[in-house]
Amino acid sequence: MTPTTAPECITVRTEGRVGIVTLNRPKQLNALNNQLMDELGAALKAFDADDDIGCMILTGSEKAFAAGADIGAMASYTFADVYKGDYITRNWETIRSIRKPVIGAVSGFALGGGCELAMMCDFIIAADNAKFGQPEIKLGIIPGAGGTQRLPRAVGKSKAMDMVLTARMMDATEAERAGLVSRVVPLEKLMDEALGAALIICGFSLPSVMAAKESVNRAFEGSLSDGVMFERRIFHALFATADQKEGMDAFVNKRKAEFKHQ
Ligand code: HXC
C-alpha cells in the first residue's frame, strides 16, 4: 500500500542530494508495524526514483533505532494470519529492492526486527550508545526478517548463535569489532558522520555507485566465481559511461571530476 496521506510513523527530509528517513514512533521505541513499514518502503522507493537523490540515510531516535517488531500488534496473530497475509515478505523487505545506497545510522536499541532492518542497510554507522540484539527467543519465536541469515554472515556463526540463542545484546564496541558496523562515533556526532559519508557517495558517479552496491551484494548470493564474473562484466560495462571518461580524464589532468551521473 502506498500511503496517500502524509506519513505518521516516519519523517522524511533531504539534505542536498541525501534523502533522510527517520523512524518516528517514540512512545513505542520505534517498534515496527505494518503502517511504518509501508511508509518506509514508499519513502525509500520515492528517493530511489528521484534523480536529485544520490544516497539515503535511515535513522531512529537517540534511545532507539527500533526496538523490534511491534509485539502488541503481533501478540494475537495466528499462523493463518501471518501465512496468508505474507507477514514480513509483503512489505518489510522493500529496502532490499532499493538500488541507491542506504546508510543505517543507529543509536540506542536495534533489537529483533530493528537489528534486522539495520542489517538490510548497505552499511551501519553506530553511535556509541547503540545496542544490537536478536531477543526473539524470549518471545517464543525466532528472528523472522533475515536475522538468522544476515547476522552470521556479518559476525560469524559463534557470535550469531550466541546472540540468537541467549538473547544477549551486543554493544557498539563489540559490534564494530565483530564487523556488524563500519564505524562507531559519539552519539552527538552520529548524523554528521552519516551525512558526511552520504555526501561523499553523492559526489561520485551514480551509475558506478549503484553498480558497486549491486556487485558487493553479489558476495552474499551464489558462488565466488559467479560473483567475480558478475563484477567483471559490470566493471567492463562502466567503460561505456561518460562518467568513466570524466573520472579518468580528471585524474590524468590533475583536476576535480565533474560527474554527470551518466
Ligand atoms: C511494542 C514496544 C517494543 C516492541 C518497546 N516497546 N519495545 N512496544 N513492541 N518491540 C514499548 C514498551 O512496551 C513501552 O511502552 C515503551 O516502548 C518503552 O519501553 P520500556 O520497556 O519501558 O523501555 P526500557 O525499560 O528502556 O526497555 C527498552 C527495551 C525494552 C530493552 C528495548 O522495551 C524491550 O525489551 N523491548 C522489546 C524488545 C524485543 O523483544 N524486540 C524484539 C521484538 S520481536 P509503554 O506503553 O509501556 O510505555 C521481533 C520479531 C522480528 O522484532 C521478526 C520479524 C520482523
Image: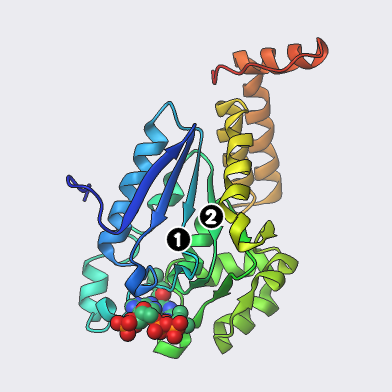
Ligand 1 shows up in the quarter that is bottom left
Instruction: Residue 245: name its quadrant.
Output: top right
Residue 193 higher or lower than 64, as above or below: above
Q: Amino acid at mark 2?
A: Gly
Instruction: Estimate the x, y position of residue 67 in percent, counting from the top left.
Output: 43, 73
Residue 157 higher or lower than 138, as above or below: above
Residue designated by label 2: 104
> Going from the N terminus, do you reach mark 2 or mark 1 first?
1
Q: Residue at x 17, y 47 (%)?
A: 5
Q: Residue at x 75, y 11 (%)?
A: 249
Residue designated by label 1: 60
Determine the CA span between mark 2 and mark 1.
9 Å
Instruction: Estimate the x, y position of residue 108 in percent, counting from the top left.
Output: 53, 70
- Kindly tell me whether mark 1's CB lies below 8 Å from ligand 1: no
Total numbered circles: 2
202 on left or right of 228: left
Instruction: Residue 113: name its quadrant.
Output: bottom left
Q: Neighbour class for label 2 at 10 Å: few (<14), some, many (≥20)?
A: many
